[in-house]
Image (tube, rainbow, N blue to C red):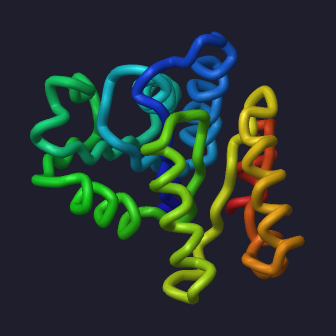
Amino acid sequence: MDTLTVFCGSSNGFNPMYKDAARQLGSFAAEKGIEIVYGGSSSGLMGAVADGALGAGGRVTGIIPEDLKPKEIAHQRLTHLITVSSMHERKFHMYERGNAFVALPGGIGTLEEFMEVLTWSAIGHHQKRCALFNTGGYYAPLQKLLDHMVDEGFLADTVRETVVVENDPETLLEKLF
């Protein structure tokens, strides 16, 4: 079974379109037989993507550090909920289980997780696809920054070209799998 590791916010953001898009992505992934691997929370976009997949009969694995269980309110209806001791261990398990990675809107944690797997791809540690789910143009500033890095000689254009950027969940999944 293909697995998609999802990085996203534990809050909903201000615009309801983010939550709707997260739920749609989870639902479309389930319909395509793609298991979701994510941070294990029931709140925010994390909860929305999990609920979308579960509502469509999909499989969802959550990985949550023990100390975040009360803060992020660990999801209780997942196929699997794995409790780990640290954020580093969480990221390791999310990376190991994913065949591809996608960042939905989120904050600095989401950005850090995505940039780490993109960096690992750039230095040859894996060949897994990395994508930005660009709901409402959320990641347009990051796209511009990545392009600037290429223009200034700090990022190879071959690495920049590997980043899938898509605002439609079905198209995004087609490009990843």
Q: Position of residue 33 (x, y in %)?
A: 55, 49
Left or right: 17 in relation to 140: left
Identify the image quadrant of the C terminus: bottom right
71 or 94: which is nearer to us? 71
Q: Residue at x 83, y 52 (%)?
A: 144
The reply to whether residue 169 is in sight is no
Quarter of the figure with residue 31: top right
**Residue ID at (62%, 35%):** 25
Is 140 left, or right, of 27 in this rendering?
right
Question: Does residue 166 appear anywhere in the picture?
Answer: yes
- Residue, far right: 151
- Quadrant of the rendered image containing residue 22: top right
Q: Quadrant of residue 123?
A: bottom right
Residue 154 placement (x, y as % from top left): 73, 77
Residue 122 screen position, x and y as percent? 62, 80
Instruction: Please identify the residue farthest to the front as the structure is shown.
Output: 152
The residue positioned farthest toward the bottom in the image shown = 124
Q: Is residue 111 above or below residue 41?
A: below
Compared with 58, 122 (above or below) is below
Q: Residue at left 65%, top 12%?
A: 15
Q: How many marks?
A: 0
Decide which of 61, 14 is in the foreground and name it: 14
Q: Which residue is found at the position 46% from the left and 55% from the top?
A: 113
146 left or right of 87?
right
Between residue 108 and residue 176, name the one nearer to us: 108
- Image side of residue 120 versus residue 71, left or right: right
Query: Would you place residue 96 above or below residue 35 in this image?
Result: below
Q: Nearer the viewer, residue 84 or 176?
A: 84
